[in-house]
Image (tube, helix red, strand yellow):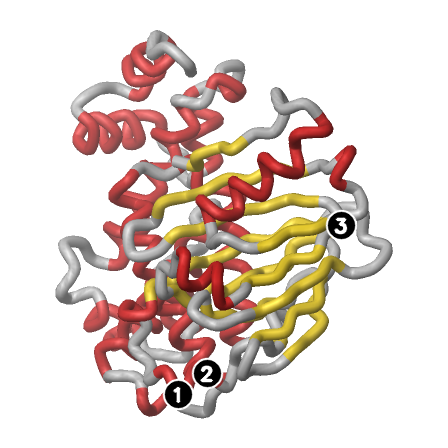
């Protein structure tokens, strides 16, 4: 689940100092300055993905700097990949490049190296999603990755678009996922990021064969999750979307506990279960929620849900409604 770090209860004159502490705890310690520190607007959330972490930040105009003293004070030894959602920023990484990035763009930096960054002039609010990858988790030589620090990574097409959409989807729907799903999605995020960085560094062939296979599976997982509401989502459609045969698709899933079709069905059931527990959807019927995720037969859905969770959809919904805080 997202860990919300809300500034709503913080006095306006204290928000800038509060946000400085949030950045230090959720990302890394940096020096922050802002001309709007007296009435600073900000917010942050952190999502634990197991293999990685995802942080969503919204903030007003500011300048940030990571110095050698701050690196000595605290360094998680991470590569951090930022996706701009709203507004823009300029960033320069010591020993790397510098770039301006806007909505849909990504940029990579190393927590072990100095940097400076500033929001784009005229932007009252900036929103960014930051994927934090432990250095040891990325299956690429550091000298290959180093050439990408502080440089724009486009998210408008190809693998970059797949990764950008995946990170955006995690930002929007991560709160609907349980810990096992989040761990799986964390592995997918790392593999997709590795594939994008390897491609940008002209080093895709240097990725271990298993890493390339995981990246492909990650793309397929992301495609499945993004299209669960499409009744036409079949193994044939999934294979065609990724330029492989249906047989090759089934081979990719042979070491998994479920087939392609069973995976699609299980994830649709997971979405139904999540929606049934959401208070804001209490007015929607069980049938409407099931139909949203392509279960058109009420008896089939009820039986499948009971087999998966040991209770009927209606019983689960009533039990969820009694849980404090829902």
Q: Earlier in the sequence, mark 1 or mark 3?
A: 3
Please indicate whether residue 164 sits to the left or right of residue 255 in the image. right
Residues at marks 2 and 1, CA–CA distance in whole angstroms = 5 Å
Quadrant containing the N terminus is top left
Quickly name the residue at label 3.
Answer: 61
Residues at marks 1 and 3, CA–CA distance in whole angstroms = 33 Å
Residue 149 x/y as whole percent? 53, 77
16 shown above or below 278: below
254 shown above or below 41: below
Element on which disc 3 rests? loop
Residue 154 x/y as whole percent? 62, 74
150 shown above or below 307: below
**Residue for point 48% across, 72% down:** 113
Quickly name the residue at label 2.
Answer: 146
Residue 110 x/y as whole percent? 46, 70
The one nearer the camera, 8 or 172, is 8
Quickly name the residue at label 1.
Answer: 143
Q: Quadrant of residue 17 in the image?
A: top right
**Residue for point 40% across, 77% down:** 195
**Residue for point 44% across, 63% down:** 71
The one nearer the camera, 171 or 110, is 110
- Residue most extreme to the top: 322
């Amino acid at each position: 689940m997202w860990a919300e770090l809300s500034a709503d209860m913080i006095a306006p004159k204290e928000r800038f100092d509060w946000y400085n502490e949030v950045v230090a705890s959720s990302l890394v310690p940096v020096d922050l300055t802002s001309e709007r520190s007296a009435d600073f607007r900000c917010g942050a959330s952190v999502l634990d993905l197991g293999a990685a972490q995802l942080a969503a930040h919204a903030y007003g105009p500011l300048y940030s700097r990571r110095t050698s003293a701050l690196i000595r004070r605290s360094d998680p030894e991470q590569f951090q990949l930022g996706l701009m959602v709203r507004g823009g920023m300029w960033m320069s990484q010591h020993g790397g490049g510098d770039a301006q990035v806007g909505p849909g763009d990504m940029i990579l930096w190393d927590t072990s190296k100095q940097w400076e960054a500033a929001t784009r002039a005229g932007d009252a609010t900036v929103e960014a999603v930051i994927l934090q990858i432990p250095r040891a988790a990325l299956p690429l030589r550091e000298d290959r990755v180093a050439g990408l620090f502080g440089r724009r990574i486009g998210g408008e097409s190809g693998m970059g678009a797949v990764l950008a959409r995946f990170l955006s989807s995690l930002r929007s729907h991560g709160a609907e996922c349980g810990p096992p799903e989040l761990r799986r999605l964390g592995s997918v995020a790392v593999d997709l990021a590795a594939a994008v960085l390897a491609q940008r560094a002209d080093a895709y062939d240097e990725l271990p064969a298993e890493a390339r296979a995981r990246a492909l599976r990650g793309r397929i997982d992301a495609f499945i999750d993004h299209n669960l509401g499409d009744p036409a989502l079949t193994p044939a459609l999934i294979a065609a979307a990724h330029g492989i045969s249906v047989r090759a698709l089934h081979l990719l899933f042979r070491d998994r506990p479920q087939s392609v079709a069973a995976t699609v069905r299980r994830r649709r059931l997971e979405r139904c279960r999540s929606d049934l527990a959401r208070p804001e959807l209490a007015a929607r019927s069980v049938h409407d929620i099931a139909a949203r995720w392509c279960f058109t037969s009420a008896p089939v859905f009820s039986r499948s849900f009971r087999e998966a969770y040991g209770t009927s959809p209606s019983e689960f919904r009533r039990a969820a409604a009694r849980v404090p805080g829902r």
